[in-house]
Amino acid sequence: MTGTLVLAGTPIGDVADAPPRLAREIAGADIVAAEDTRRLRRLTHALGVRTGGRVVSYFEGNEAARTPELAEALAGGARVLLVTDAGMPSVSDPGYRLVAAAVERGIAVTAVPGPSAVLTALALSGLPVDRFCFEGFLPRKGGERQARLREAAGERRTLVYFESPHRLEATLTAMAEVFGTGRRAAVCRELTKTYEEVRRGPLGELADWAAAGVRGEITVVVEGAAQEDGPQPDGPELAGRVAVREEAGERRKEAIAAVAKDAGVPKREVFDAVVAAKKAPPGPTSPGTSGGAP
């Protein structure tokens, strides 16, 4: 007989949110694979339970190497409980590799449903939740982050991101540049903890707020792109609108920003359209306009 892999949700803040089954699974598991064994000890102390089996670490640094070992234990009949620092395993946390290995071997996989920062932030954001997509953590490098955001610029579903506090200002600034300063969003900080805070507002305002520094665990919820009533303007049209504003005396930077806002597209898209228009070869000369004799 093969064993069972149990993915257990753990509290994202308040330990009282731990599902009742969690204590029973911790006590009954043959192996508890924990992202941080020290946090596991604090959790078991808070729950008043002892681990009944062997405890091993299972985190990003050793996930690839430890997965075969745990898969063998499962194949041998062990009940393996997987817990992460907070929330559900596999959701921007270790777990996917082990689940995939268990499924490939035909081993049963089940879950102890628990708290989720994604769903909690969505519910508190005040933004539409009928359709949403989870984007996890954005790349740390600015160029890669901008590219990822541009991919999502036209997404009409509500977007959910995780972010670290020291990168929050840069991320919100990049979002305001790509999505537009007026796009609605919510920054959810320290959910279910003592200093829980949900800051709602346009991306531009949230970026200014974050400049003063923010602490804690962060989840960002961003409104999806608006449904356009008519066709979106193409590159030449965007470039033409900028040219009209420049001819009227407006600086190019301000003209691009204004056109992007009016069209509901990222400023980068308008900028690229202007650059492409400058590089485009001139059109054919109409008869009678070259100055020569007919």
Image (cartoon, grey):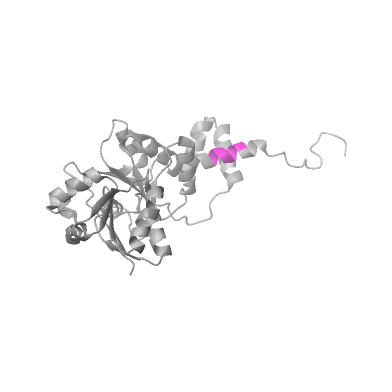
Asked if residue 114 lies left or right of residue 264, the reply is left
Q: Position of residue 81 (x, y in %)?
A: 27, 57
Q: Eyeballing the image, is 67 above or below 139?
A: below
The answer to whether residue 51 shows anywhere in this view is yes
Q: Position of residue 117 (x, y in %)?
A: 28, 51
Asked if residue 41 lies left or right of residue 249, the reply is left
Quarter of the picture containing the N terminus is bottom left
Q: Position of residue 5 (x, y in %)?
A: 31, 61
User: In the picture, residue 111 is in which quadrant?
Assistant: bottom left
166, 266: nearer the viewer = 166
- What residue is rendered at 51% in x and 37% in y? 256
Q: Eyeballing the image, is 286 above or below 102?
A: above
User: In the picture, residue 291 is in which quadrant?
Assistant: top right
What range is drawn magenta here? 270-275
Prevailing secondary structure class for the magenta stretch in the rendered image: helix
152, 259: nearer the viewer = 152
Query: Hey, which residue is sitting farthest right in the picture?
Result: 293
Asked if residue 281 lies left or right of residue 19, the reply is right
Q: Position of residue 42 (x, y in %)?
A: 17, 45
Q: Eyeballing the image, is 112 above or below 273?
A: below
Query: Hey, which residue is sitting farthest front in the picture?
Result: 76
Q: Is residue 244 magenta?
A: no
3, 232: nearer the viewer = 3
46, 34: nearer the viewer = 34
The answer to whether residue 133 shows anywhere in this view is no
